[in-house]
Amino acid sequence: MPSQLIIDCSKILNEKGLTIAFAESATAGRLAAEFSLTENSGSVLKGGLVCYDAEVKVDVLGMDPAFIEEFTPESGEVTKELALRLKNLIKSDVQVAVTGLTTPGGSETEQKPVGTIFIHMFLNERSIAAREVFEGSPEEIVLLAADLAAKTVIHELEQL
């Protein structure tokens, strides 16, 4: 069952007549799956791309491998670029991208430990970024990341 934040986000999107799409790395499709379980999914969810591996970011979204290498696949810069490129892949009113570290073995550092999640969204021409560090199991981090995405979208929709 989706969290209350995801249910509320879907409802607000529906009330405003807006659609949403996702480019998911760290959440590997879980965000789109959670939105698909809401009452308004048919009118708000356009779809998503799971781009867990950097090769998918390059092959499907056309990202420059040097850009990914420079900033790391789990970074604010790459997350913003994913959201930007999603606009041309899936037509929607809101584009949300998620990257981060749910398990060891990625680009973690002291400044970017496991549990770090990056969200970037575009709403009209507004560009919004969020970064949080969560603790827990990989699944807990993924669910917290999904809630962070929903919370970020809700906050921006309330500004409309």
Image (cartoon, helix red, strand yellow):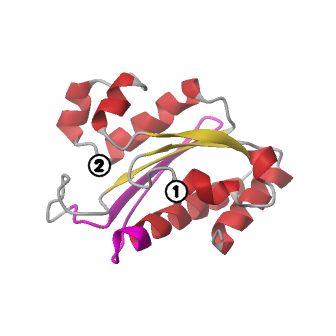
| Disc 1 to disc 2, C-alpha distance | 17 Å
What's under tag 2, amino acid-wise? Glu
User: Residue at position x 43%, y 36% from top?
Assistant: 82
User: Residue at position x 77%, y 44% from top?
Assistant: 18
User: Residue at position x 66%, y 36% from top?
Assistant: 124
Q: In which quadrant of the rendered view does residue 59 lie?
A: top left
Q: Earlier in the sequence, mark 1 or mark 2?
A: 1
> Disc 1, disc 2: CB below 8 Å?
no
Comparing 146 with 30, the one in front is 30
Q: In which quadrant of the rendered view does residue 43 lie?
A: top right
Left or right: residue 11 compared with residue 86: right
Tag of residue 132: none
Q: In which quadrant of the rendered view does residue 1 lie?
A: bottom right
Comparing 76 with 21, the one in front is 21
Name the residue tied to disc 2: 74
Which region is colored magenta? 112-140
Q: Position of residue 150 (x, y in %)?
A: 60, 61
In the picture as drawn, the residue positioned furthest to the left comes out as 110
Left or right: residue 148 compared with residue 135: right
Q: Residues within 10 Å of mark 1 (few under 14, many from 20)?
A: some
What's under tag 1, amino acid-wise? Arg
Left or right: residue 114 compared with residue 141: left
Name the residue tied to disc 1: 30
